[in-house]
Image: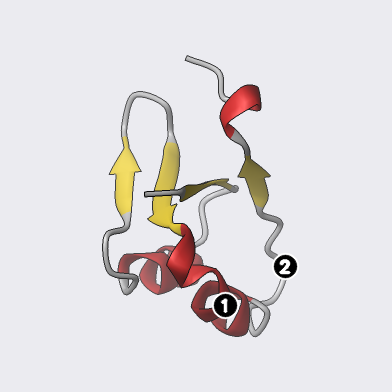
Amino acid sequence: MTSLFLTFEYNKDAIEVIKSCDGAQWDKKKKWWEVPILNLSYLLDRLVLLDDIQLTLKDEQSRQY
């Protein structure tokens, strides 16, 4: 399964949106959310409604361990 890896400054509303995605998981060690890519459209539709949020999408090559 292909995933999205999201990092952002703490935002309660964004976290609630991400948590509502099937298969979303928080990685405590790497400090990012992993969300199945099938949720991309859902995320964009909802996150665009939030004020002052800046998301960073990480690809597999740029992931730091």
The image shows residue 31 at horizontal and vertical percentages of 43, 33
> Can you say whether 29 is above or below 48 in the image?
above
- Please name the residue shown 59% across and 48% down the image: 8
The image shows residue 11 at horizontal and vertical percentages of 52, 60
Task: Please indicate whether residue 23 sits to the left or right of residue 10 in the image.
Answer: left
Task: Please indicate whether residue 23 sits to the left or right of residue 44 in the image.
Answer: left
> Can you say whether 39 is above or below 64 in the image?
below
> Can you say whether 18 is above or below 33 in the image?
below
- The answer to which of 28 and 57 lies nearer the viewer is 57
Task: Please indicate whether residue 25 sits to the left or right of residue 55 in the image.
Answer: left
The image shows residue 4 at horizontal and vertical percentages of 51, 50
Extreme residue in the front direction: 1
- Please name the residue shown 62% across and 75% down the image: 44
- Secondary structure of the residue carrying tag 1 is helix
The image shows residue 9 at horizontal and vertical percentages of 59, 48
Q: Residues within 10 Å of mark 1 (few under 14, many from 20)?
A: few
* Residue highlighted by disc 1: 41
- Please name the residue shown 34% across and 70% down the image: 21
- Secondary structure of the residue carrying tag 2 is loop
Residue type at mark 1: give it: Ser
Q: Residues within 10 Å of mark 2 (few under 14, many from 20)?
A: few
* Residue highlighted by disc 2: 52
Label 2, label 1: how many angstroms apart (C-alpha)?
Answer: 19 Å
- The answer to which of 62 and 47 lies nearer the viewer is 62
- Please name the residue shown 62% across and 37% down the image: 59
- The answer to which of 23 and 56 lies nearer the viewer is 23
Residue type at mark 2: give it: Asp
Residue 49's mark?
none
* Mark 2 or 1, closer to the camera: 1
Q: Which badge, 2 or 1, is on the more N-terminal residue?
A: 1
